[in-house]
Image (tube, rainbow, N blue to C red):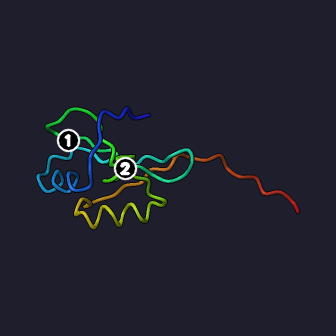
């Protein structure tokens, strides 16, 4: 689990990307479904979660596809690697 130390608004995230101060961008799956975006920077210590502008609650993306479109629109994506945990082999049952 990643500890959240602060919030980041979309406009700030875009600025940080343009300034090339982002050191990591984490996509974190949520237990209830959806994904959150958590970033770290080279100049400000801690992990920052992307929040909605009005409510300042963590922004939830319903799918990886929508999150990737957001990152692309913001100019924050050059490479995206998705690692999935290994799942136990499923057994085929009869009927």
Question: How far apart are labels 2 and 1 at the CA level?
Answer: 23 Å
Viewer-side residue, 85 vs 55: 55
**Which residue is found at the position 43% from the left and 65% from the top?**
65
Tag 2 near tag 1, CB within 8 Å: no
Q: Which residue is mark 2?
A: 55
Q: Residues within 10 Å of mark 2 (few under 14, many from 20)?
A: few
Locate residue 17: give its quadrant. bottom left
The residue pinned by badge 1 equals 41
Task: Give 49 or 23, whichever is nearer the viewer.
Answer: 49
Q: Is residue 17 left or right of residue 24?
A: left
- Residue at 15% across, 54% down: 15
Secondary structure of the residue carrying tag 2 is loop
Q: How many marks?
A: 2
Q: Residue 43, image x and y in percent? A: 13, 37
Tell me: 37 left or right of 84: left
Foreground mark, 2 or 1, reads 2
Within 10 Å of the Cα at label 1, are there few (<14), some (14-19), or many (20+) other Cα atoms? some
For the N terminus, the image quarter is top left
Judge from the rendering whether residue 13 lies leftward or rightward of residue 62; answer left or right. left
- Residue found farthest to the left: 19
Residue 1 drawn above or below residue 82: above
Residue found at x 23% / y 52%:
13
């Amino acid at each position: 689990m990643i500890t959240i130390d602060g919030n980041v608004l979309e406009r700030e995230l875009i600025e940080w990307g343009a300034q090339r101060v982002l050191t990591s961008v984490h996509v974190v799956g949520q237990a209830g479904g959806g994904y959150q975006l958590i970033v770290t920077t080279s100049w400000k210590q801690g992990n920052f979660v992307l929040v909605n502008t009005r409510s300042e609650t963590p922004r939830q993306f319903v799918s990886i596809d929508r999150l990737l479109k957001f990152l692309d629109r913001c100019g924050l994506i050059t490479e995206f690697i998705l690692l999935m945990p290994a799942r136990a082999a499923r057994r085929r049952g009869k009927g």
